[in-house]
Image (tube, rainbow, N blue to C red):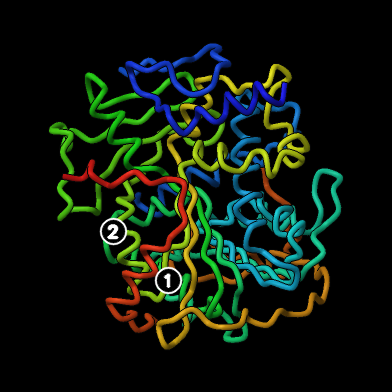
Amino acid sequence: MEEQLSRHYDRLQERDYNRSKAGLGSGGGPGASTLAPDGAAVAQHYNSLQDRHRTLTGGSDILHLRNLNNWIKSVLIGRYLKRGHSVLDLACGKGGDMLKFKAGGCAAYVGIDIAGQSVRDAVYRYNGANGRPGMNFPATFAVGDFCASDLDQTLPPQLRFHLVSCQFALHYSFSSEASALQLLRNVACRLEPGGVFVGTTTDANVLVRRLRAAPALTFGNDHYSVTFDAAHASKCFPAAQPFGIRYRFSLQEAVEDCEEFLVPFAMLVKLAERCGLVLESRHNFTDLFAAEWRTNKQLLDKMRVLPEHGAIADAEWEVAHSYLAFAFRRLGPDGKPPQRPPPTVRNTGHRPCTDAGLLWLPGGDGAPAPPGGGGAPSRKREQPEPGGNEREERRAKVQSVHQEKDALFD
């Protein structure tokens, strides 16, 4: 069985999904490919999603895709998070990644999201929800638009971080250069030199390739769909116009016809460098899985990523291949990586949070709750740019499994 899985997942790096190819994995299964924001809207969408209680073995029609995504986030976070680190969780949503930070030894946590009700759900989860214990680290929660407001001016001055995480959300910032740059400035402003910015976002190369293979402007399968605006009927994306490339995305049980934007990765790297962040790694999800599953096999089994027969269905792999994971390192004031890691902080333990303790930053959805809220969910400054030669040398040393050039942007 081990040898069979090895051969199967080694082939992941060699194959892709589009209209003419069968796709990754040997699982097959139903739903194989049939190619055929504003901030307020995003907040409203995620507020409307119920904080459903799921297990690793049930409660979802895309169970193995969800478990795979969580496994990838766990591997990515676990690579950089050390005991005694402080964490800034941008687009924290309902707090679904807090257990990952807890497992990694997080000593202090700040979660920020534009959706007020989602943050209230995160507070409820932090305090202990669905019969689970609360988190064992102190936390601060904030409602606000981190793509439009300056966190360096609005967060309490003592808050600094070893790790910044932004999972499945960076693509919303690419509506404009100003929005994307503000997000990266907010990442860098409180990130300790030597600290790391990790995240997951859509893989623009994959989406553009699928778009060009599709007969119209829509493609997908039973689990997801992507529809580009009529403005992109030519299916050409000039490199000189990397922002505001809009499409609408739906994902079963998670996203319903939500506005997103392509993230040309070369532009993300350039903007990050302006903020003192240098690329360390970039991996498409299937590349990352193929490279890491042996090393993290115990976690793979614990999180029930693979079904009993050992292969995730093609339709779910197709969705996973739409995403990539990345990591950027924060440079020091001299534009170079620091020689020593930043000092850790002491974990002072759990402190109960309430609605009254939420921070309300510019651009957040909803209104501050009255004092004494219970926290239960209601259901219904830019750094100097490094020198050119040093920057190019560091870029050349980036160790990434995903080596595809950004040639799809003409």
Q: Which mark is residue 267?
A: 2
Q: Which mark is residue 277?
A: 1
**Residue neighbourhood size for the residue with mark 1, other residues' Cα within 10 Å, grouped as few (<14), some (14–19), many (≥20):** many
Asked if residue 265 lies left or right of residue 333, the reply is left
> Could you say whether the residue bearing mark 1 is in a helix, strand or loop?
strand
Mark 2 and mark 1: span between their CA atoms? 13 Å
Q: Is residue 220 above or below residue 355?
A: above
- Residue 296 pos. (x, y %): 70, 43
Q: Is residue 11 above or below residue 140?
A: above
Front residue (pair 221, 378): 221
Q: Amino acid at mark 1?
A: Leu
Find out whether the residues at labels 2 and 1 contact each other: C-beta distance under 8 Å. Answer: no
Front residue (pair 89, 162): 162
- Residue 73 pos. (x, y %): 60, 48
- Residue 332 pos. (x, y %): 47, 83
Q: Which mark is residue 260?
A: none
Q: Amino acid at mark 2?
A: Met
- Residue 166 pos. (x, y %): 52, 57
Q: Residue sitting at 45 percent across and 48 percent down?
A: 201
Residue 117 in view in this figure? no
> Could you say whether the residue bearing mark 2 is in a helix, strand or loop?
helix
